[in-house]
Amino acid sequence: MQLKTEEIERIIEMSLTEDIGAGDVTSNITIPENSQAKFSIRAREEMVVCGCNVAELVFSKIKSHGKVITEIKMQDGDVASAGDVLLEGYGDARVIMAAERVALNLLRQMCGVATITRQYTEEIIGFKAKLLDTRKTIPGLRSLQKYAVKMGGGQNHRIGLYDGVLIKDNHIAICGSVENALKSARTKAPSGMKIEIECDTIDQLKDALQFGTDSVLLDNMTIAQLEEAVKIVGGRIPLEASGGVNLKTIRNIAQTGVDFISVGSLTNTPANIDIGLDME
């Protein structure tokens, strides 16, 4: 997934409106008008860098005062150590103070997702399984989070409900059976769109194979069940494991031979990365 400028700007405008409102009262009454300052945004721990261009854009979106000139020092995907400068700038002090929190919030969010994603991918090196994200994202920030997953070495699953068919347990419950759900999807799915179905049991997996699906999500299955599922499928279609995945369990899951492992915690509980802005 690549970030679109208009999407970044939407998120920044929303975030600045939420934070600044009618104005930065404290800075406006304590910092003399037209005061100039220099700042650095630094990593305070090791991390995968992601989002410096987003943070940079925040400083250019505040129009009520003067300008801030910024320079990105580290690129997306780089690994930063504690003390490394990610971004630095010089300009209107009031603008810097008004932009600080939004810039740091978005940068910390993206670096956090990229960093935890890298940790997960390192656990499954040597296995064929690829790491996937999910739709369990922070509302309004999905595009930034899914981009950060890519920068951390993971892959994107569906971006939303509109770009992929994933028949889940509640769809099956409403349709009445795996057979009914798959037959309906096969008849009505947009041309060329792949169909995936969630299976909670081995019996459901067998039904999915019988009635036709492009891939199967194995939900909350034990290691033994995953191994059995891989054996039954025999490589005919991709298998995705989901549920109960963490840094302690993902390697054992990868060893079963599944093709993909999806992890909701990449985006719904990203690492709390420590990044700070310091005036110089």
Image: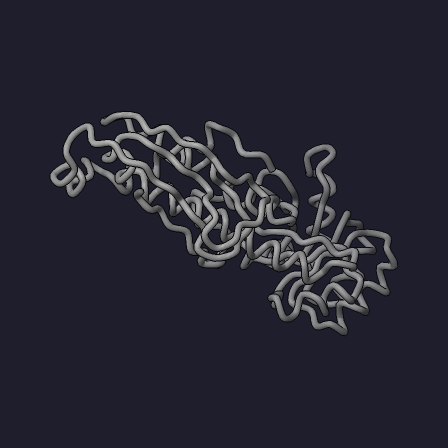
Front in this rendered view, residue 69 or 226: 69
The residue sitting at 61% across, 68% down in the picture is 244
* Location of residue 245 by image quarter: bottom right
Residue 274 locus on image (x, y percent): 42, 56
Residue 41 locus on image (x, y percent): 40, 44
Residue 133 locus on image (x, y percent): 60, 51
* Location of residue 54 by image quarter: top left
The residue sitting at 47% across, 32% down in the picture is 7
Q: Residue furthest front?
A: 280
The residue sitting at 49% across, 38% down in the picture is 73
Total marks placed? 0
Residue 279 as seen in the image, left or right of residue 72: left
Residue 183 as seen in the image, left or right of residue 78: right
- Whether residue 177 is visible here, answered yes or no, is no
Question: For the N terminus, which image quadrant?
Answer: top right
Residue 118 locus on image (x, y percent): 61, 54
Front in this rendered view, residue 49 or 63: 49
- Whether residue 271 is visible here, answered yes or no, is yes
Residue 7 as seen in the image, left or right of residue 211: left
